[in-house]
Amino acid sequence: MQNVTIKSRAACLLLLISLLFVGMDGNGQEQDERAELLEQQKVLRAKIETLRHEQDFLIFEKTLYATNSKYLIIDLGTKKGQLKYKNRVLKDFRFTASANGAVDAFKPGTLTLTKKIEDPGKRHVLIFGKSLVIQWKRPAGSPYAANIPLLSLSNRDFQPIFYAVEEGAKAYIMR
Amino acid sequence: MRTIKNIILVILLLSCCVMTPSPVWAGEATALVTIDALREQTHAMEQEAAVLEEENRGLMKMLKEMEDDDIYLVVDTESNRLTMRQRNRIILTAVVGTGSRQFVEEETGRNWYFETPTGSLTVLGKERNPVWIRPDWSYVEENMPVPPENDPDRIVRGVLGKYALILGNGYKIHGTKYTELLGTHFTHGCISVGDKDLEKLYRSVKIGTKVYIY
């Protein structure tokens, strides 16, 4: 009888110890799942941001299709741009970006042409508020772009664009 | 017996502690994030991404429907270039002549400014062997008396090349005898094109083709 009691106690103890180990294993699994979920969230966060930018651009194109205004698409990644009207490309162009680091900090989005400066020496400038300056490529830099990102185009590309866009015209910056 | 009971109780308590999901600090946030909350957050993010993807697909479809495969012409009056495009493809680039931006005034006070109109125009007609009906300004420009409106002297053949694309209001895309001036502002507002390019344009362009001039 005493033997049976000892055996049953031992069995109970074994069961409890095994339960303890099961619990420890569950905790390990949970840690794994937690790490996996956090990694998944990181990927999803990046995906959502990309999708938001994509949507922003698509809405921009859709909106501009309905207007009677020419606009610019500026891709800072490829250093290529397009003059467009109702989603149709009127002109492709290339540009160089200023090396003051301001261009690198640029976030994708819409800019508005606030000022066209017509220089008597044909050194015209397109100013997009305090966000961006577009001008004809020249060695001396620009008095309009101290700390503002500056894009320079060849004269042959810049002149037609300068006259094609009106103040208030939109530009979309892509990366 | 009592000791054994106590041991069992301690083991039970310990195992409960180990089995209970332990809350963690989510980064720098001050709120505790349990595994369930983390699962919910991830699910919500997945849903948000799915909704955005769906919306973007809809927008892309809408924009695609706005597009067409039609050929269109673009005239850059600053650099005197004409491009024929289809979607994002350039089919033809031609050196052209556009309005001289000159001003002519008649003694009576009538005046003309020779500029190519900008904006969105449409090819309204196509002509073979077009005939030029000399307008008043061409007589004024040469200090000649202006003949009556239907005077047959106004009809001039062979100066507009083999073909012309009619843009309306007297403006056309046509050929020229002054091919050496292509690439400059020399016309009275029409767009002059070299013979070879003109033929390609005439064959490719349909009535209704859009012409964007800037």
Image (spheres, coloured by chain):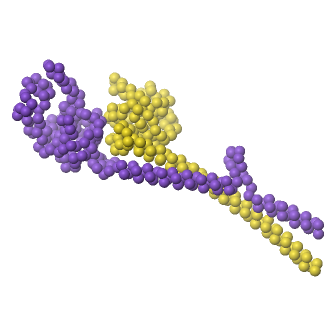
Chain colours: A yellow, B purple
Where does the image place residue A57, in percent across and percent down from the top left?
45, 44
Vertical arrangement, residue A10 with respect to residue B102, above or below: below
Vertical arrangement, residue B93 with respect to residue A141, above or below: below
Q: Which quadrant, please, contains the C terminus of chain B?
A: top left
Where does the image place residue B21, in percent across and percent down from the top left?
74, 58
Q: Left or right: where does residue B25 sit relative to residue B44? A: right
Where does the image place residue B126, in percent across and percent down from the top left?
17, 45
Q: Left or right: where does residue B145 sit relative to residue B117? A: left
Of all residues shown, which one is farthest toward the bottom? Answer: A1
Q: Pick whichever, B97 or B212, lies toward us.
A: B212
Residue A139 visible at all: no
Q: Pick whichever, B130 or A121, lies toward us.
A: B130
**Number of numbered discs on residues:** 0
Q: Residue at x 40, y 50 (%)?
A: B62
Q: Residue at x 36, y 51 (%)?
A: B65
Q: Pick whichever, B192 or A151, lies toward us.
A: B192
Q: Left or right: where does residue A46 sit relative to residue B2? A: left
Q: Which quadrant, please, contains the N terminus of chain B?
A: bottom right
Residue A88 visible at all: yes
> Residue B123 sits in which quadrant?
top left
> Residue A153 sits in which quadrant?
top left
Where does the image place residue B97, in percent across and percent down from the top left?
21, 35
> Residue B113 sits in which quadrant?
top left
Q: Left or right: where does residue A47 sit relative to residue B72? A: right
Q: Residue at x 91, y 68 (%)?
A: B4
Q: Residue at x 50, y 30 (%)?
A: A147
